[in-house]
């Protein structure tokens, strides 16, 4: 038995942002909260949205002071923007941090008892659906436009809260790859590896189901096939395929779960303010190798989908081949960093391991690791 969740509507393709016009009209909207990234404003993405939001027809308030790893204080600042202004809809344009912030704002507006943002760090903690959200991602990896997850940093505790609440699903996702064209190579690489992590963790996690498997496996193949051309060659077709892949990966983990890579990566972001996608890219091969001891059969399926002849190979060989494939992809994209290079200190590993064991993502991992095993994995990535 399993349940499926997702957007009510999804629009995909270059120029699909034009659907905003009809969306606003049919939902009888008067007040709009526009949650948008600073870079989207600075680099002209906002100008690509404004023609479809008539400022003379709607009352619009904007919040764009959003950090790359949004904090509790950041969310409270966004809520303050809505003072004396209850939006009928939230339009959010940006990367994962922006859309996550919009989710947190939108859910507190309809659940004022959750004004203590830490209280959201419990699975399905709210009673009421959030203000309806229309999400337009500008990066190609997080998949947050199709999930119930949003990640907020607790600065005081130096950790990230992975909040999971079905009341925060955006009602509509608009995957317009024209909005993603301006991504720098480094961002395109790290967010693409984020999407690969979503798909791989979803495919091997203990809550997987036939539908999530289908989406995850398709996403894995699309990413391995297209990420080089999308990131390094800026090929338009490959970028469109990556936009689709990251959505499929998001849909998959929204209906299965993630795992240890994310539980560990959240601590690196919380402790050191590191980019989430890059942390996932670094940790993915090591955690997959660790998980492989009990799910090499799932790795066989992945490798067959990628065109690898797995006949006659021992389980240990299967694990090593996938490990090398992920590492090769990191080397190709420039995401083959070491945690030590990024300032991670060994004296913090025990604290991060403790926090990873409390992270909401870890329960779906195919193996429940010990603290010592998590520390060892961090060290392997150092």
Image (tube, grey):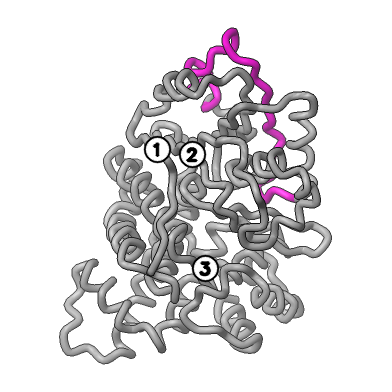
CB within 8 Å, label 2 to label 1: yes
Query: Residue 261: image x %, image y %?
Result: 53, 70
Residue 289, which numbered label? none
Q: Quadrant for the N terminus, please.
A: bottom left
Q: Nearer the viewer, residue 31 or 74?
A: 31
Density class for disc 3 (Cα within 10 Å; few <14, some 14-19, many ≥20) is: many
Dot 3 or dot 2: first in sequence order is 2
Please, what secondary structure does the residue beneath circle 1 have?
A: strand
Please, what secondary structure does the residue beneath circle 3 have?
A: helix
Whether residue 269 is visible, yes or no, is no
Query: Residue 290: image x %, image y %?
Result: 47, 84
Is residue 105 shown above or below 157?
above
Residue picked out by circle 1? 9
Q: CA distance from mark 1 to mark 3?
A: 34 Å
Residue picked out by circle 3? 282
Residue picked out by circle 2? 171
Residue at x-position 49% and y-position 55%:
190
Q: Would residue 130 be counted in the magenta stretch?
A: no
- Magenta region: 45-71
Q: Quadrant for the C terminus, please.
A: bottom right
State the residue lying farthest toward the right: 156
Whether residue 337 is visible, yes or no, is yes
| Image quadrant assignment for residue 275 | bottom right
Dot 2 or dot 1: first in sequence order is 1
Which of discs 1 and 3 lies nearer the camera? The answer is 1
Q: CA distance from mark 2 to mark 1?
A: 7 Å
Is residue 379 shown above or below 238?
below
| Image quadrant assignment for residue 38 | top right
Q: CA distance from mark 3 to mark 2?
A: 33 Å
Q: Would residue 62 be counted in the magenta stretch?
A: yes
């Amino acid at each position: 038995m399993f349940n499926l969740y997702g957007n009510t509507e999804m629009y995909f393709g270059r120029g699909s942002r034009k659907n905003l016009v009809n969306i606003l009209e049919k939902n009888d909207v008067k007040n709009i909260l526009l949650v948008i990234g600073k870079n989207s404003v600075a680099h002209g993405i906002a100008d690509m949205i404004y023609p479809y939001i008539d400022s003379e027809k709607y009352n619009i308030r904007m919040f764009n002071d959003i950090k790359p790893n949004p904090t509790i204080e950041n969310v409270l600042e966004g809520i303050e923007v809505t003072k004396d202004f209850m939006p009928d809809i939230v339009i959010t344009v940006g990367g994962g941090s922006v859309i996550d912030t919009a989710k947190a704002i939108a859910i507190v507006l309809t659940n004022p008892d959750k004004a203590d943002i830490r209280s959201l760090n419990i699975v399905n903690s709210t009673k009421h659906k959030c203000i309806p959200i229309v999400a337009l991602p500008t990066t190609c990896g997080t998949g947050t436009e199709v999930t119930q997850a949003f990640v907020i940093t607790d600065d005081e505790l130096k950790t990230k809260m992975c909040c999971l609440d079905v009341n925060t699903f955006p009602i509509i996702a608009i995957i317009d790859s024209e909005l993603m064209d301006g991504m720098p190579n480094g961002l395109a690489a790290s967010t693409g590896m984020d999407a690969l992590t979503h798909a791989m963790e979803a495919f091997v996690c203990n809550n997987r189901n036939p539908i999530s498997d289908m989406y995850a496996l398709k996403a894995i193949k699309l990413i391995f096939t297209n990420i080089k051309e999308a990131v390094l060659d800026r090929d338009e077709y490959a970028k469109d395929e990556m936009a689709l892949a990251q959505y499929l990966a998001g849909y998959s983990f929204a209906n299965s779960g993630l795992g240890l890579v994310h539980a560990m990566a959240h601590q690196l972001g919380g402790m050191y303010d590191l980019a989430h996608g890059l942390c996932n890219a670094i940790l993915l091969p090591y955690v997959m190798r660790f998980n492989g001891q009990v799910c090499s059969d799932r790795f066989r399926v992945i490798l067959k989908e990628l065109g690898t002849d797995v006949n006659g190979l021992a389980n240990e060989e299967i694990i090593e081949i996938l490990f090398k494939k992920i590492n090769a992809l990191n080397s190709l994209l420039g995401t083959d960093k070491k945690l030590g290079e990024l300032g991670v200190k060994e004296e913090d590993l025990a604290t991060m391991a403790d926090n990873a064991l409390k992270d909401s993502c870890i329960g779906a991992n195919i193996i429940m690791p010990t603290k010592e095993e998590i520390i060892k994995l961090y060290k392997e990535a150092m």
